[in-house]
Amino acid sequence: MIGATSLAEGRRLIAEASRDLAGAGFAPATSGNFSMRVGPTRAAITASGLDKATLSETEVIEIDLRGRATSGEGRPSAETTLHTQLYRRSPEVGAVLHTHSRVQTVASRVLPTEGRIVLAGYELLKALTGITTHDTSLVVPVFPNTQELEVLARQVEAWLDAGHVTYGYLIDGHGMYTWARDMPEARRHLEALDFLLACELSARGFAP
Ligand SMILES: [Zn+2]
């Protein structure tokens, strides 16, 4: 299975990503959550409500693909369902990053037209696996925020079922979900999408 790793290695990579990404402003005030697939029916995810900048491996818990904790200390966040739906959909999803950067939050508010942001003509689109030229465009959907995560999950499911090429999505006034086959690729996708959203904000006169 692509991206699957051992629970111990998953915990190490998730804790490392958590500290790095929080240090770069992707997870302010204990927000965000990061996960990896650790088997055909298991994932590992950061426990809820912790400071992601100081997260240790013991604060990463194992869950099944319905989001129930199967080992480890702490409890999974309510947003876990948005991770597990991606793992259930495709064996090629090996890592999921949910972030709340300032760029993502502002972009979700000011950039969408009819619930979509189009990123076109950027060289850095090539950082996204499968894109080989700047001469293309990527549609990033922006879903309305809600505390009813099952409602959000159904909207994401419908978008993915429609066959869009998708590396991530935004939630209005909230943040972004990004995924890939493994953690290094997911981190690259996250950095690229965040950078491109910042470029769009700057190009339209907003200070990101
Ligand atoms: Zn969130």
Image (spheres, rainbow, N blue to C red):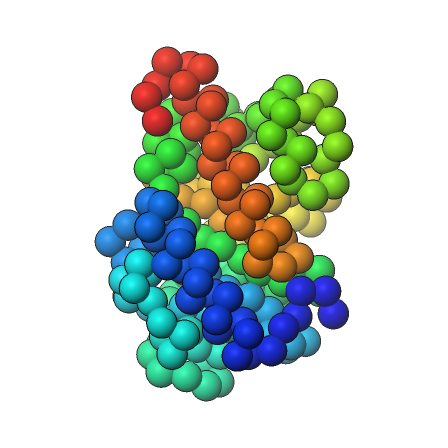
Given residues 185 and 107, the one toward you in this image is 185
Q: Would you say residue 111 is visible in this rendering?
A: no
Given residues 166 and 36, the one toward you in this image is 36
Q: Residue at x 50, y 41 (%)?
A: 191
Given residues 187 and 83, the one toward you in this image is 187
Please provide percent x and percent y for residue 188: 56, 45
Q: Quadrant of the C terminus?
A: top left
Q: Quadrant of the N terminus?
A: bottom right
Q: Is residue 108 left or right of residue 43?
A: left
Query: Which corner quadrant of the image does residue 127 belong to?
Result: top right
Please provide percent x and percent y for residue 118: 57, 26
In the image, residue 121 sits, relative to residue 51, either above or below, namely: above
Query: Which corner quadrant of the image does residue 74 belong to?
Result: bottom left
Please provide percent x and percent y for residue 101: 36, 42
Q: Residue at x 40, y 54 (%)?
A: 20
Q: Would you say residue 50 is visible in this rendering?
A: yes
In the image, residue 79 sits, relative to residue 68, either above or below, namely: above
Q: Residue at x 46, y 86 (%)?
A: 71
Instruction: Give the tally of numbered discs.
Output: 0
Q: Residue furthest left?
A: 29
Please provide percent x and percent y for residue 202: 41, 19
Q: Is residue 166 left or right of residue 152?
A: right
Q: Residue at x 37, y 67 (%)?
A: 77
In the image, residue 121 sits, relative to residue 166, either above or below, namely: above
